[in-house]
Image (cartoon, rainbow, N blue to C red):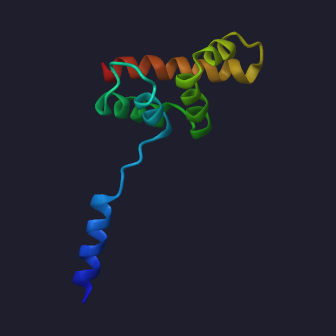
Amino acid sequence: MLRPLFLSIVIIALTAPVQGGVIERACMSGGRDAANPNLCGCIQQVADLTLRNSEQRKAAGFFRDPHRAQEVRQSSRSADRKFWERYRAFGDAAQTYCS
């Protein structure tokens, strides 16, 4: 009796779309020629290790609006400076790990 239920769960799991993280999705939809699932997935893995979820959402916005990154980088707000330090560390780690 459990076999039909198990098969149904397996079929649903195999046919459900895979949802990547916010950075991975932004990377894939950012319109860059070098973007591919392996690279964007790697960058997401680094983001998961180095950035909080809220920071990942903020960083993902930079793919849509690169000028926003410049605004945050030049901001005099303490929170933006701290975020930018973590974001740069993320970028450096992603470049090292994913290239």
Task: Identify the residue shown where x is 60% and y is 18%.
Answer: 85
Task: Identify the residue shown where x is 75% and y is 20%.
Answer: 78
Q: Position of residue 66 (x, y in %)?
A: 57, 16
Please, which residue is most extreme toward the front here? 31
State left or right for residue 64 relative to residue 1. Answer: right
Q: Position of residue 56 (x, y in %)?
A: 55, 33
Task: Identify the residue shown where x is 58% and y is 35%.
Answer: 57
State left or right for residue 91 relative to residue 40. Answer: right
Which is more toward the observer, 24 or 95?
24
Q: Position of residue 4 (x, y in %)?
A: 24, 82
- Figure quadrant of the C terminus: top left
Which is more toward the observer, 96 or 1?
1
Q: Position of residue 64 (x, y in %)?
A: 55, 25
- Figure quadrant of the N terminus: bottom left
Task: Identify the residue shown where x is 66% and y is 21%.
Answer: 82
Please state the total of marks drawn on the protein image.
Answer: 0
